[in-house]
Image: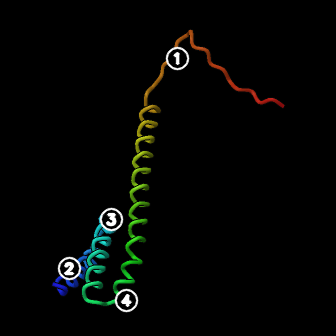
Amino acid sequence: MVDVLGYAASIAVLATFLMQTMLPLRFVAILSNILFLLYGYYAHIPPVLFLHATLLPINVVRLNACAKSLRLSSFLRGCLASLAQYSSARRTLRSTDCIRQKRSVK
């Protein structure tokens, strides 16, 4: 049983190296940290336990930052799309419209 945890954790680490985007990479890295924590605990290997107990909160914080960044970039994409839609709408001036030019005061 302990060896199965070790192999599963190793496969999860290998999978992180095959990821091309950060969000899935962080999820799989957190999974590997949890598996290695269990492996280190049941196999009585303190260095593995300590390493992955340290890496787990780092991966959680980075996952949170990545998720925030994705939400922000999604918000910015929405803003840019709205801006593009607004700027592409053509407005025709009527004779009753008033156009003012700002003058600089010296």
Alpha carbon distance from label 3 to label 1: 48 Å
Name the residue: 18% across, 87% down: 3
Q: Amino acid at mark 2?
A: Ala
Is disc 3 placed on a helix, strand or loop?
A: loop
For the residues bearing labels 3 and 4, Cβ distance under 8 angstroms: no
**Residue 39 rendering spot, x and y as whole percentages:** 26, 83
For the residues bearing labels 4 and 2, Cβ distance under 8 angstroms: no
Quarter of the image that includes the N terminus: bottom left
Q: Examine the rendered structure and indicate whether residue 47 appears above or below residue 17.
A: below
Alpha carbon distance from label 3 to label 4: 29 Å
Say whether disc 2 or disc 3 marks the residue closer to the N-terminus.
Answer: 2
- Disc sitting over residue 21 in the figure: 3
Q: Which residue is mark 2?
A: 8
Q: Amino acid at mark 1?
A: Leu
Q: Which residue is mark 4?
A: 47
Is disc 4 placed on a helix, strand or loop?
A: helix
Mark 1 or 4, closer to the camera: 4
- Disc sitting over residue 35 in the figure: none
Say whether disc 3 or disc 4 marks the residue closer to the N-terminus.
Answer: 3
**Residue 33 rendering spot, x and y as whole percentages:** 32, 76
Name the residue: 44% across, 50% down: 72
Badge 4 crowding class, 10 Å Cα cut-off, few under 14, some 14 to 19, many 20 or more, is: few
